[in-house]
Each structure stands twice: as structure tokens, then as C-alpha cells.
Image (spheres, rainbow, N blue to C red):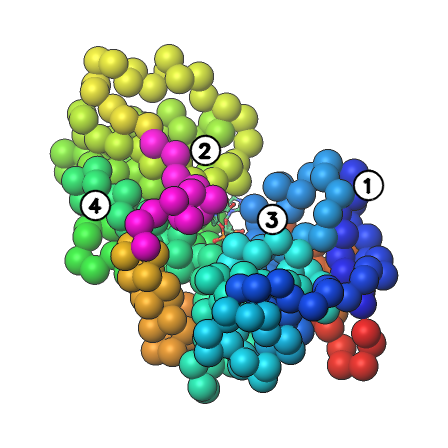
Amino acid sequence: MRALTATPAGLELRDALRPPEPPPGHVVVRVTAAPIHPGDLAVLRGTTRVGGLEGTGVVEQAGPGTGGLVPGARVAFFPVPGTWAEWVTVPASLAVPVPEGVSDATAALMLCNPLTASLLLRAIAEAGGGPVVQTAARSSVGTLVSALADGVPLVNLVRNEPGDGAISTSDEDWRDRVRDQIGGGARVVLDAVGGSLTADLAELLMDGGTLITYGLLGSGSTPVEALNLVDRGLTVRGVTIRHWLLRTPEERRADVERAVRIAVDHPELLTVAATYDLAEHAEAVAHVGRPGKRGTVLLTHHEGQS
Ligand SMILES: NC(=O)c1ccc[n+]([C@@H]2O[C@H](COP(=O)([O-])OP(=O)(O)OC[C@H]3O[C@@H](n4cnc5c(N)ncnc54)[C@H](OP(=O)(O)O)[C@@H]3O)[C@@H](O)[C@H]2O)c1
């Protein structure tokens, strides 16, 4: 089978062995689509392994103890290493049945970003709620946060092309315009940009507020001393989807149920930027970092090329 392998020199399409018979509690899935999230590329740098952590496909073989996951069942899965391949072995506990009517493209995006949005919304609630200022508001995750914020006052920042109420940090007066909207300051800043923007973002917080950081799209850096954390009683908190499996089973079940509901009722929130064959990985990776991209890049494979 073909598999997209990360090497220190970059991604390579290699021939790999098809997965063996699935062990107990696992299924072998023929992958139909798998996303390239921006974070996938950062994590893979300098490693040698098949990439991808999320995907969707059809169960081909089910090991003992996999419940209702019979061959032919459509499933989505995350976090499962090695989804940029034609087949992958998936723990049954991480395989989510795809409801009828949900397309492969939507199913491929059904878990990672909605689960991240759930973690971020929980972190916002733990920090006391709104008003919230969020950066990279037109990102896939930012779009989900906006849609799910459920009444939490939210000011959206983008780096260019203001509109739909979003304020562009390229405009000279962006800080004043944010302050006009949030009055006494933001209780939470939700930030995927970081770098040199961090100092400005911390300035927008009310005393006692929380900066939640979950991405590093920007450049430059801000020394922690510049944030005046002590005098202003500010909190800086990192959130990562890599800790999602540490949440309680009840929280995880609720997060997955919400993710499935989004896929069924609001597939427009799980936008595909473009779809590429595994062999077109260079174009696909270039697309991931393209300014103005909307949605997530998907990898797929043409039938009959295994
Ligand atoms: N912590 C976690 O567990 C976790 C999980 C998922 C995602 N993330 C992070 O969340 C961020 C968004 O991910 P995504 O998949 O939603 O992204 P995405 O759909 O690929 O969108 C990227 C967005 O970021 C904007 N952007 C890119 N560089 C920027 C910069 N220097 N300053 C301001 N905005 C910039 C782009 O704006 P333009 O339209 O202007 O190009 C675009 O709207 C990434 O940093 C990702 O690594 C973290």
C-alpha cells in the first residue's frame, strides 16, 4: 500500500506493508480521506513515521472484541497515528461510526477540530467566560468556536480582510476598536497566533484575565516579563488536543456527541479547502500554509492505485 512518510528531508510517498490481521479491540480500515492539519506538519518535523492523526474510512477487518464495528462500517477516527496511508489499524475505542448521509469529506474533519473547539470552550468557561477576544478567527477552529460560543460575547480578530464584524490587526487602530467593543477589557483572549502579538493581546485583558494559547501561527516572541502577569494577576494557559484523551470518559463522550451533531447538522462548519491524492503531497502541504485558505486540506487516494 502507499503511505506518506515523514522523513527529516520532508514527506515521501513510500510503499509500506498493509496492516496485519487486527489484534483484539482493533479494526483495519481502508482510509477514504484524511486531513492535513497545520499542527500535523509541525509535529512531524524531524521524525520518520507515517503521518496523519485523523481520518475516515471503511472497516475491512475487525478483531475480536470490537462490538458493532463490522466490515463495511464507515468510521471516523482520531487520534490514530498513520492516517496518511491507504490502510490503518484503529483501536475500536477511537472509531466513531459515521452517520448515514454524512459525506467522507465531512467525516474526515469530524473529530479533531470540533474536539479542540470543545476543549477551548471548556477552558473559556473555566476562566470565567466572556468577553472573549479570539485571534485567527477565520481558521477552521476559530470558525467552530464562533459558531459554538453560545451567547459568550466574542470579538474576532483576523490579520487582514476585515468583515463580518471581524477586526483586522493590520489596521492601525485595531486595539482601540477592540476596546470600544469590550469596554473594561476581555476576560479571556483565545490565541492561535502568539509571537510578537502576545504583548498587545495581554494588554486587552482585564486585570485577573486569562490568555489561552493554543497555536503559534505568528512570528517573533514576547518575553513573559513583558506581560505584567504579577501586577495584573493575569493567567496564561496552554491548551492542546493532545491532552483530550486525559479528559473524563463522560466529557469525551459529550465532546464526540457534539462533534457528530456538527457533522450531521452543520457540515458547512467542516469546510474542505481542497482534496489531493497522496501522490500530490507537495501541493497539498503548500496549500496548508497558503494565506487566505479557508477550511482544511484533505488527502485521498485514487481507487485502484493500491
Ligand atoms: N492546541 C491544539 O491542540 C490545536 C488543535 C487544532 C489546531 N490548533 C492550532 O490552531 C490554529 C488554527 O488551526 P486551523 O486548523 O483552524 O487553521 P486553518 O484552518 O489552517 O486556518 C489558519 C488561519 O490562520 C490564519 N493565520 C495564519 N497565519 C497567521 C498569522 N501569522 N497571524 C494571524 N493569522 C494567521 C489564516 O488567516 P488568513 O486567512 O489571513 O491567511 C487562517 O485563517 C493553528 O495554529 C493550529 O496549529 C491547535
Q: How busy is the neighbourhood of tag 2: few (under 14 within 10 Å), some, or many (20 plus)?
A: many
The residue labelled by disc 4 is 125
Q: How busy is the neighbourhood of tag 1: few (under 14 within 10 Å), some, or many (20 plus)?
A: few
Q: Amino acid at mark 3?
A: Asp
- Which of the 4 quarters of the picture holds residue 259? bottom left
Q: Secondary structure at mark 3?
A: helix
Instruction: Tell me the distance, in whole angstroms, between the alpha carbons under discs 2 and 4.
Output: 21 Å
Q: Secondary structure at mark 4?
A: helix
Q: Which disc number belongs to residue 194?
A: 2
Examine the rendered structure and indicate whether residue 90 appears above or below residue 177: below
Instruction: Tell me the distance, in whole angstroms, between the alpha carbons under discs 2 and 3.
Output: 18 Å
Q: Amino acid at mark 4?
A: Ala
Q: Amino acid at mark 2?
A: Gly
Looking at the rendering, the stretch of residues picked out in magenta corresponds to 237-249
Q: Are marks 4 and 1 in contact (CB under 8 Å)?
A: no
Residue 289, percent from left and from top:
62, 50
Q: Are marks 2 and 1 in contact (CB under 8 Å)?
A: no
Question: Where does the C terminus fall, quadrant-wise?
Answer: bottom right
Residue 99, percent from left and from top:
43, 81
The residue labelled by disc 3 is 40
Q: Nearer the viewer, mark 2 or mark 4?
A: 4
Examine the rendered structure and indicate whether residue 208 appears above or below residue 26: above
